[in-house]
Amino acid sequence: MKWMKAYDEAMYWMRNDEWFTVNHEKDCFELTDAAPPRAVESFRMYLLRNDLPVADAVRPSERQLKTN
């Protein structure tokens, strides 16, 4: 296995266009339900390193569960 830098792991979630979308209203990236657990953790790393709210790492289906 190739050694991966921490920065690379924080950007893993961008490897597949089906894992994320761009929310133009909020001007941010959002994960889709297709994102696997590793992509979710990677997105959390990305948010933390960029001082963005980590709550945004929740996928749409999980967001819906929290509001019910």
Image (cartoon, grey):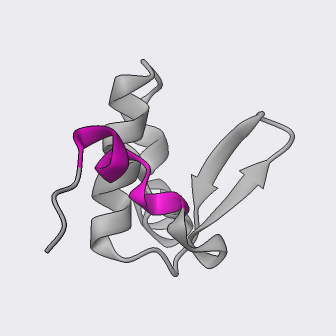
Residue situated in front as seen by the camera: 12 or 60: 12
Percent from the top left, x then y, of residue 17? 66, 72
Which picture quadrant has residue 51?
A: top left
Q: For the view shown, which residue lies furthest in the right direction?
A: 25
Residue situated in front as seen by the camera: 32 or 39: 39
- Label count reads 0
Residue at the image point whose x is 36% and y is 25% from the top? 49
Residue at the image point whose x is 28% and y is 68% from the top? 38
Which picture quadrant has residue 16?
A: bottom right
Quadrant for the N terminus, please: bottom left
Q: Taking 48 as reference, is 9 above or below it? A: below
- Does residue 68 show up? no
Residue at the image point whose x is 24% and y is 44% from the top? 5
- Does residue 43 show up? yes
In magenta segment, residue 12 = yes
Q: For the view shown, which residue lies furthest in the top direction?
A: 51
What secondary structure do most residues of the magenta stretch adopt? helix
Residue at the image point whose x is 52% and y is 77% from the top? 33
Percent from the top left, x then y, of residue 39? 37, 65
Residue situated in front as seen by the camera: 63 or 29: 29
Is 27 positioned to the left or the right of 14 in the image?
right
Percent from the top left, x then y, of residue 25? 86, 39
The magenta segment: 5-14
Q: Taking 46 as reference, is 43 above or below it? A: below
Residue situated in front as seen by the camera: 5 or 42: 5
Q: Taking 28 as reference, is 64 above or below it? A: below
Is 24 positioned to the left or the right of 16 in the image?
right
